[in-house]
Amino acid sequence: MTRHTPPPAALTGSALPFPFTAIVGQEEMKQAMVLTAIDPAIGGVLVFGDRGTGKSTAVRALAALLPPIRAVEGCPVNSARPEDVPAWAEGATGRMVTRPTPVIDLPLGVTEDRVVGALDIERALTRGEKAFEPGLLARANRGYLYIDEVNLLEDHIVDLLLDVAQSGENLVEREGLSIRHPARFVLVGSGNPEEGELRPQLLGRFGLSLEVASARDVATRVEVIRRRDAYDRDRDTFLRAWKGKEAALRRRILAAREGLAALDTPDGTLEDCAGLCIALGSDGLRGELTLLRAARALAAFEGAAAVGRAHLRAVAPSALRHRLRRDPLDEAGSGARVARLLDEILPASAP
Amino acid sequence: MTQPRGLLPPWMRVETALTLLAVDPAGLSGLWLRARAGAIRDRVTSALAALPVPLARIAPHSTDEALYGGIDLAASLGAGRAVRSKGLLAGRPTVVLAMAERAPAGLAARLGRFLDAGGWAVALDEGAEAEEAPPAALTERLGLFIDLDGLSWAETRDIRLDPARLAEARARLPAVQVPPAATEAMVAAAAALGIASLRAPLMALAAARASAAFRGAGTVTDDDLSLAAGLVLAHRATVLPEAESRADAPEPPPPPPPEADRDGPPEDDALPDLSGEMLVAAIRAMLPADLLPPLAPARAARSVCGGPWGWGAFRRGTRRGRPLPARPGQPGGSARIDPVATLRAAAPWQTIRRRLTPDRPGVLIRREDVRLRRFAEASDRVLIFAVDASGSAAAARLAEAKGAVELLLSQAYARRDHVALVSFRGTGAEVMLPPTRSLVQTKRRLAGLPGGGGTPLAAGLAAALDLARAARARGMTPTLALLTDGRANVALDGSGDRVQARQDAARLARAIATGGTPALVIDTAMRPQPDLHALAQAMAATYLPLPRADARAMAETLAAALGG
């Protein structure tokens, strides 16, 4: 099946995204996404960069890579146990099914109704019943919420997200409805920094942030084009060729999830963590927590017995660069500041 | 079709682009057609019928219901059951976006998703100015670009695309081979032109393949490549590489565009091979000589005034602009009711309310049902001039500054910008003119501007900052232009303490930078002042030393820096 077949085939083709492992380069972005897959508590990824650098491709690829979840069939919030299904939900059968981890798109210009859910107008009109029609936040529970061009999102939608991302619960009080349901999701955002800044409050809700750029050398760029072209021209063959690697990465993520609990966190690492955050003057303790969680996830992914300084160094730039106070005179950007301090405070040679 | 090196007559280029789009719409994702509405554009759009699926027209303010389908409220109320309308995108049509230059970012994002999933679209862009263009999120994803500007009716003719030949080409397309060297050449050419996105070479290769398929060839040749590069890459170029280099003399890397340093051109050792150079040369030949210079100022304007279209920032209001989703509220003042949203809110309660008041006819609407219209509109820009009228500056410069301001005023009038004027001299600053659009009033105040005394730079900055804040609070987008010779010698409290004066000025400069007000510092001293340069940096402002400027030169520089 190729993209040149008539429209219906192209539509079904979009259900088979480009394999995550086939993305060339962009190691930091891939690592950040794998880390959130291992420990969702890290709290999401923000990817800033130019257009055509594979941001959207990576997010959609991640969806296919994630291990499926067990959920109650027909439950609008993907509950893990039948007793967790909210009272207002109808159509939940109580049977458990395996379904892919939800990755929900939140488009720009979306209305509040669509995000938080609203009165089901159809039922209200036709049957005069007061029923709740769940929104995108319900569907994203236990999964991912992806916002492309997150820096262009309208303010009142950002306010909603800030509140829900913090509490993990969506509270709907409108049109005579009073409903609450869990909404725990990993926030993934992408955007182009030239078009607008992100509010610091929203910035802080993302666990990791990174800046991507197109590969500079021609050889890498050619390889990107070659793989994409092969995927476009013969999707089935391409997906078959990468099936093994995808499965291997998925197994590694699952193994890392299990290994996370047994992982040892030495006091030295905690001190390193605190020292770095104090030196950087990052706001609040969220930075330290995220840094530690990300480092633990990385250690688990690498199969290490304990979290070490090397793990901290590897994740520090993406965990901290968006938490610094903005310095208008610093041309190099926050990433460079983190890297500079990293070398001062946590030199690689020490234990 | 077989003319070499991509040097096609303009109308041939249009025909070729449409042919390629008809052969492989999914690979090319669509067309960005820049043209004013008219008979020539109609000739192009009528050829879109050759595309394999029917057209669906959408407007910049098309709602989600229109795009994706939803409940048709009017039909539902009439029929007494839910009537769903089918969204325009549901049938995966060839989307034709009219007035694409007015499309908001939200629509661009939705269409971008549609294009990423294998759809295709044609954006009809009627932008008049260079910076009036569809959102980049959309144009980046559309493969082909055609500009009909400057084409006369005589140069054009009806476009006839042979459906049978197109069908043949489509059937041949999957088998067309792309030699590895061709891929490398295309990627190298894109990199040499400073195109960071990898979508561009990908779509250029799709165009080359479509071209080969249409010719009936089984393999992509150099001619296909240069044709494709001209149609897909040329308009994305951000740097123009030197043309006359040869393989034995390593080509110097082209100067990177100032704002895209990290995606600059490739290193010396990764330079394009001969074939890549050939493509760059083909594109070079296709670009009009004056195409690239306008690119940079347009972008500078963007960064100075903050808005994506070179206008002011967007704000939400209740009166004008593009519609946004309605919100609950009470009517009054300038707020207007959104009848449909209000009915939507009231609809579910009708059964209950009817029971309570069976005698009242019609739809029962209560206060809490009321939904208000909201609109997004580009806010007005206000240029705040802070002019140094001190003794040191007055002698030579004040007249020139006045002249420059007057020239800018006439430009601002044409752009419907507001202008405000602050002058500082002696011990303090004075707002000579609050933000206004009145040209006559401004001229009168300017003529009466007195000169002489010390330089209370800090006071001038403070007054300008206050004006900027007030303007922002009223929904306008302020831009600051400071004209001074920089010898701050009066502090904020009016004393003649030079050290204190300088510290106060620096403090206010930082406050302006923190407030995010774009600014411009024009040094009118005889020699450029390092102090003033430092001040401009603290203000995050553009610094323009103009030791020997006359009014016209100053106005031109200012207009260029402000994107006027």
Image: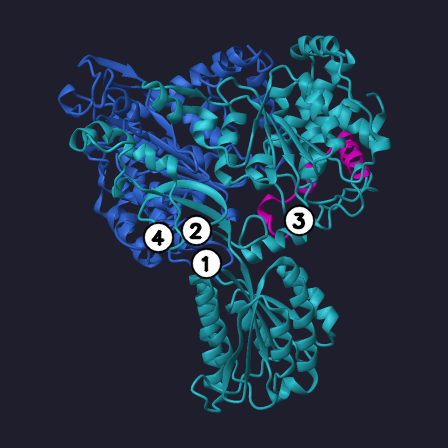
Chain colours: A blue, B cyan
N-terminal label among 2 and 3? 3
Mark 2 is surrounded, within 10 Å at the Cα level, by few (under 14), some (14 to 19) or many (20 or more) other residues, namely many
Q: Is residue A19 left or right of residue B231?
A: left
Q: Nearer the viewer, mark 3 or mark 1?
A: 1
Question: Is the C-beta separation of discs 2 and 1 under 8 Å?
Answer: yes
Q: Quadrant of the N terminus of chain A?
A: top right
For residue B473, side relative to residue B436 (left or right): left
Give residue A217's position: percent from left, percent from top.
Answer: 62, 36
Give the magenta-colored segment's residue range. B256-285
Q: Earlier in the sequence, mark 2 or mark 1?
A: 2
In which chain is the residue bearing label 4? B
Q: Which mark is residue B475?
A: 1
Mark number, residue B256: 3
Q: Is residue B97 above or below residue A64?
A: below
Are the two marked residues, 4 and 3, in contact with CB atoms closer than 8 angstroms? no
Separation of marks 1 and 4 at Cα, in angstroms: 20 Å
Res B128 seen here: yes
Quarter of the figure with residue A164? top left
